[in-house]
Image (spheres, grey):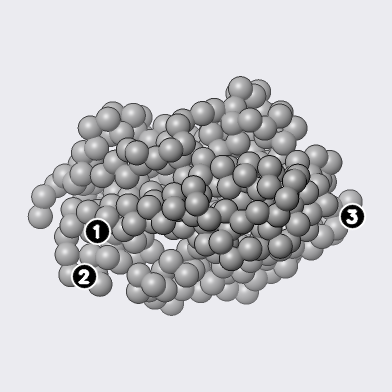
Amino acid sequence: MSNTFYIPNVLENWKWPRRINPHYLEVKAETAAWMRSFGAFSPKVQAANDICDFCLLSSLAYPFYDKERLRTICDLMGVFLLCDGCSDIADGDGVQEMVNTTMDALRNPHTPRPRGEWIGGEVTRQFWELGIKTASPQSQKRFIETFGSYMQAVAQHAADRTNKHTPTIEEYFKIRREDVGTKPVFTILELEMDLPDEAVNHPTIQELSVLAADMIILDNDMASYNSEQARGDDNYNVITIVMYQNKTDIQEAMNWVSEYHKELEEKFMDIYENKIPKFGKPVDEQLAQYVDGIGNWVRANYQWGFESERYFGKKGLEIQRTRWVTLMPKKCSKKIDPQHPDGSKLSSHVDVGSRATTVNV
């Protein structure tokens, strides 16, 4: 088997160019200080999270947002990171209690959290207490709905991981469309809008959202495959699933993903250019802005995969240019885990809802 593989440039002809919010660095500093104030991560894990730079992703995905709304999405990325990190180490009951705590905090953002509760409850409460100040009522309602679906999918992912279940390609997409987090972040596109349910929930708009989510999933998995296979955590990656299901090698799986990505792109653009439903002003103007934001999210996620150090370390821009990746040997797993770059492990149990309030290394 070759020790290199080629990542196809799936967005070579994508309509949306790279753009970044001018408030990026200022808001990044504010969100970082806010997250550190909880002491939820050890210094080593916090340093690894900083390398991922989810505020960069936020700033690429919402290039025209004002400072206040950009802060909302950057803070949300902190919530995602905390929930994802804790769900990776908690058992099934612990993850479900995380879900319950988080959703209760979202529904009651002005109510103090109980003493001794998992710190994620207070992080979520503060995020949403600030976020609703610049969010329309419709976007608030939909965010809570979509974030609830995301959290339940996280719980399902945790169960699959515990059971060592390797899904089929079809099963994988069904689950990942929920736990990849695109539904709540697409809702954030609505913060300053007042889109009615019939517009956002229209079957054509929903299909557009699914197509974008699937492209984001494919882009994530192509970028993350090398580090995941090196640490033995690639059974929940489309490259591995395609290799297993189609009995092929890495490069052929990458090529399969590239071809499928092109099909999704063509379907997306056909809808975007020809089939967006009309509802009359001002809904049509807001809906156009909303679907434009969905298209931009695909570009933003793709760029972030190369520009942050999450997947390729400091070689991301070089790999974006050359497209060639050297396969990491399994023995390197302790060096490349983005959550534990020093080879350390998180605690094997999280006492969600007990006196434990931090995640310790």
Q: Earlier in the sequence, mark 2 or mark 1?
A: 2
Kind of element beneath mark 1? helix
Q: Are marks 2 and 1 in contact (CB under 8 Å)?
A: yes
Question: Is 290 rendered above or below residue 158?
Answer: above
Question: Which marked residue is nearer to the observer: mark 3 or mark 2?
Answer: 2
Question: Is 73 rendered above or below residue 96?
Answer: above
Question: Which marked residue is nearer to the observer: mark 2 or mark 1?
Answer: 1
At a point 43% along the width and 38% down the height, the residue shown is 15
At a point 51% along the width and 44% down the height, the residue shown is 295
Q: Is residue 315 left or right of residue 191?
A: left
- Which of the 4 quarters of the picture holds residue 161? bottom left
Mark yes or no: residue 216 visible: no
Percent coordinates x, y for residue 112 in the rendering: 88, 53
Percent coordinates x, y for residue 64 in the rendering: 63, 30
Q: Amino acid at mark 2?
A: Asn
Q: How many numbered marks are there?
A: 3
- Which of the 4 quarters of the picture holds residue 203? bottom right
Distance from disc 3 to disc 2, alpha carbons, whole Å, reads 52 Å
At a point 80% along the width and 40% down the height, the residue shown is 134
Image mark for residue 299: none
Q: Amino acid at mark 3?
A: Thr
- Which of the 4 quarters of the picture holds residue 6? top left
Depth check: 73 or 278 in front? 278
Q: What quarter of the picture does the N terminus occupy? A: bottom left
Look at mark 2 in the image and give the residue it sits on: 246
